[in-house]
Amino acid sequence: MSDDTSQERREIPHDRRMLEALVCPVTQGVLTYDAERQELISQAAHLAFPIRNGIPIMLIDEARKLD
């Protein structure tokens, strides 16, 4: 396996159905997936939860505040 292929897999190994099943830990509301930034967005809570190595980090302390 080439380095390019393994790098691609580290960036996008998540399952779309798994992402759709997740809810915001603050509001229990719907999350929107931002593929470019690799984040799950909670418009209601004004937070963006990172996805690192294909794993959604659903900790409030790790979320980025949206302006």
Image: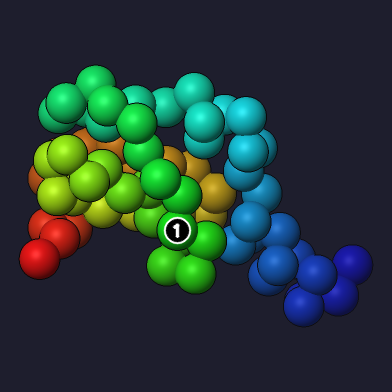
Answer whether residue 31 is visible to the viewer in this image.
Answer: yes
Please determine whether, in this image, residue 35 is positioned above or below residue 7. above
User: How would you rate the neighbour count of disc 1 (Cα within 10 Å): few for under 14, some for 14-19, many for 20 or more?
Assistant: some
Between 26 and 1, the residue placed more toward the observer is: 26
For label 1, the residue is: 34
Disc 1 marks a residue whose amino acid type is Asp
Vertical relation: 28 (above or below) 33: above
Tell whether 17 sits left or right of 3.
left
Q: Does dot 1 land on a helix, a strand or a loop?
A: strand
Residue at left offset 63%, top offset 38%: 16
The colour style of the image is rainbow
User: Where on the picture, by quarter, is residue 65?
Assistant: bottom left
In the image, 6 versus 11, the foreground residue is 11
Residue 41 vs residue 54, the one in the foreground:
41
Q: Is residue 22 above or below residue 36?
A: above
On the image, the x and y values in percent for residue 57 come to 34, 42
Image position, residue 25 (x, y; %): 22, 27
**In the image: residue 31, left or right of residue 3:** left
Q: In the image, what residue occupies the spot 62% across and 29% down?
A: 17
Q: Is residue 51 visible?
A: no
Q: Position of residue 15 (x, y in %)?
A: 65, 37
Relative side of 5 to 29, left or right: right
Residue drawn where x is 66% and y is 49% of the image: 13
Picture residue at 26% right of the left edge, 43% below the top: 42
Report x, y in % for residue 55. 48, 43
